[in-house]
């Protein structure tokens, strides 16, 4: 008798399931199946059997969080310390590298339907621990009612777990966090309660110049507390900081990017050295969080740019100008474009202090400003693009195709958005020549990579209209 199609039972929020994890998804969650239904499990690696609680449950898949490892994967290694920011520390480092290398390839092949490119071996990290030059901590209150400064507990938006040694930060950066926490406790300041929106202390951002030894400490709070805020005693407590800043915000979301920032003591910008450049970084400007590996990432971008000397380069999403300033001395002209005005001001200052006199940096939204840039500067020979995780919209890719650079160097922090962007460029006539992952973030699932696309000599590019483009799912 015909049994009909197999019935899959959709798990519901709050269900506890026993799951066997057989692979890893992009973003790092384990993939398991429950009665034919795909479940993405955080806190689990391939080979684990876990007890997990279901969070979101959608039509096509569910998300769950591992509560208990019932039977560990034979590949697991012992974690160095509880650290919500290092979920892959249980995977041997050599295996982490293999997974990241394969995920870049898989994204390009499966999402972008691309092939024929050279996939160069992943560049391993110089330091597997204590490599981050920036950490954003959150304040909270522990079960005993004591103020803590650490990270969100896995899967919890309001619960903060304190820590005494963050293994992703250097020892001096850890000491700076502890000094500020001790001062906050002594002042009897209260943590912001994410459920009620009350309380004062929200986040602590510690940034480090790895090559200069400078520390920038930024306390993010709600509005001024009724009892006052003794900025002078904070400056005395955080004496190791080269710059101490205070940001006040009433944002509902957990963000350190908004609000009013004032300088409490020291200097506003952080000095860093990278690839022979002396850089000054404003508190709100983007800077790659692994200085040593950023140097290798940019060296790779420079290699893929294949500069001979006469080129006009565009550096889109240029931040404080780092990539462009490294490339400009090997080319004729450099034009950088960036949204955040403070970062553009840093880029201009950094060009002057490094005697790079063929670089111009403009503030603007790439989405709106690219055509104007081409009209003003002329067509680029080489275009470097380094967008945020969401990648480029189809419209921005069309603007790049109109600009018709001979070579595109795409620096990506997300292969799943690089893939459709690269596919659109290939459909227009570019060749995806080579790709290489760089491990900027050991012990985490984050993957960074660089891709080189080239317009073959004599090739006519096809610029499609918006209506001709396949719909992107994002
Ligand atoms: C991944 S970072 C890269 C920065 C720089 N290339 C570097 O390596 O330090 C992306 C940058 O894009 C900027 N950005 C985001 N959206 C933008 C937009 N629509 N137009 C221009 N810049 C934008 C961000 O402020 C950030 O500086």
Image (cartoon, helix red, strand yellow):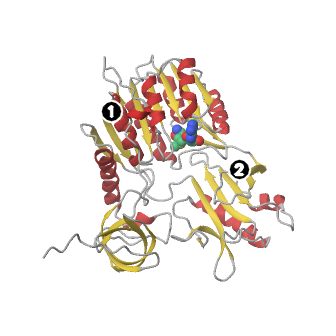
- Residue 83 spot, x, y in % from top left: 50, 68
In the image, is 456 to the left or to the right of 331?
left
Residue beneath the point at 45% across and 19% down: 311
Residue 274 in view of the camera? no
Tally of marks: 2
Residues at marks 2 and 1, CA–CA distance in whole angstroms: 47 Å
Do we see residue 29 in this rendering?
yes
Which residue is painted at 56% across and 52% down in the image? 133
Residue 254 vertical position relative to residue 16 in the rendered view, above or below: above
Neighbour class for label 1 at 10 Å: few (<14), some, many (≥20)? some
Asked whether disc 2 touches disc 1, contact meaning CB atoms under 8 Å apart, the reply is no
Instruction: Identify the element where label 2 is drawn.
Output: loop
**Residue 174: which disc?**
none
The residue that label 2 is drawn on is 242
Residue 126 in percent (x, y) is at: 42, 51
Give the side of residue 120 with respect to residue 335, left or right: left
- Identify the residue position indicated by label 1 in the image: 426
Q: Establish if 339 lies above or below 15.
A: above
Q: Secondary structure at mark 1?
A: helix
253 or 293, nearer to the observer: 253
């Amino acid at each position: 008798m015909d049994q009909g199609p197999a019935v899959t039972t959709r798990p519901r929020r709050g269900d506890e399931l026993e799951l066997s994890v057989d692979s890893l998804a992009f973003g790092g969650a384990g993939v398991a199946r429950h009665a034919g239904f795909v479940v993405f499990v955080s806190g689990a690696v391939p080979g684990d059997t876990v007890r997990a609680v279901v969070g979101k449950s959608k039509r096509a898949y569910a998300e769950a969080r591992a509560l208990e490892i019932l039977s560990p994967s034979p590949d697991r290694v012992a974690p160095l310390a509880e650290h919500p920011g290092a979920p892959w520390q249980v995977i041997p480092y050599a295996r982490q590298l293999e997974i990241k290398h394969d995920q870049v390839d898989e994204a390009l092949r499966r999402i972008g339907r691309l092939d024929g490119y050279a996939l160069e071996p992943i560049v391993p990290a110089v330091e597997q621990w204590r490599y981050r030059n920036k950490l954003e901590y959150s304040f909270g209150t522990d079960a005993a009612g004591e103020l803590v400064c650490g990270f969100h507990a896995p899967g919890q938006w309001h619960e903060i777990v304190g820590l005494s040694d963050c293994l992703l930060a250097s020892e001096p950066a850890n000491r700076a966090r502890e000094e500020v926490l001790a001062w906050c406790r002594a002042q009897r300041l209260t943590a912001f309660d994410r459920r009620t929106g009350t309380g004062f202390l929200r986040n602590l951002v510690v940034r480090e110049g790895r090559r200069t030894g400078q520390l920038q400490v930024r306390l993010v709070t709600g509005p001024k507390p009724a009892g006052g805020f003794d900025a002078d005693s904070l400056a005395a407590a955080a004496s190791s900081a080269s710059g101490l800043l205070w940001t006040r915000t009433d944002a509902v979301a957990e963000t350190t990017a908004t609000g009013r920032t004032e300088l409490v003591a020291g200097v506003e910008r952080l000095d860093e050295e990278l690839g022979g450049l002396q850089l000054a970084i404003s508190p709100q400007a983007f800077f790659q969080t692994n200085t040593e590996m950023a140097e290798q990432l940019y060296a790779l971008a420079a290699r893929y740019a294949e500069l001979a000397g006469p080129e006009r380069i565009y550096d889109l999403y240029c931040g404080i100008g780092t990539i462009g300033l490294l490339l400009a001395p090997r080319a004729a002209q450099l034009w950088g474009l960036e949204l955040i005005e403070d970062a553009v001001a840093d880029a201009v200052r950094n060009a002057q202090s490094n005697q790079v006199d063929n670089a111009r940096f403009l503030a603007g939204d790439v989405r709106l400003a690219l055509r104007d840039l081409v009209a003003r500067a002329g067509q680029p020979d080489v275009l470097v693009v380094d967008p945020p995780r969401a990648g480029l919209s189809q419209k921005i890719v069309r603007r790049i195709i109109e600009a018709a650079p001979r070579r595109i160097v795409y620096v990506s922090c997300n292969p799943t958005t690089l893939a459709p962007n690269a596919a659109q460029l290939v459909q227009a006539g570019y060749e995806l020549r080579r790709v290489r992952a760089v491990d900027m973030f050991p012990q985490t699932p984050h993957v960074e990579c660089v891709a080189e696309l080239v317009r073959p000599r004599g090739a006519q590019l096809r610029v499609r209209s918006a209506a001709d483009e396949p719909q992107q799912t994002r």
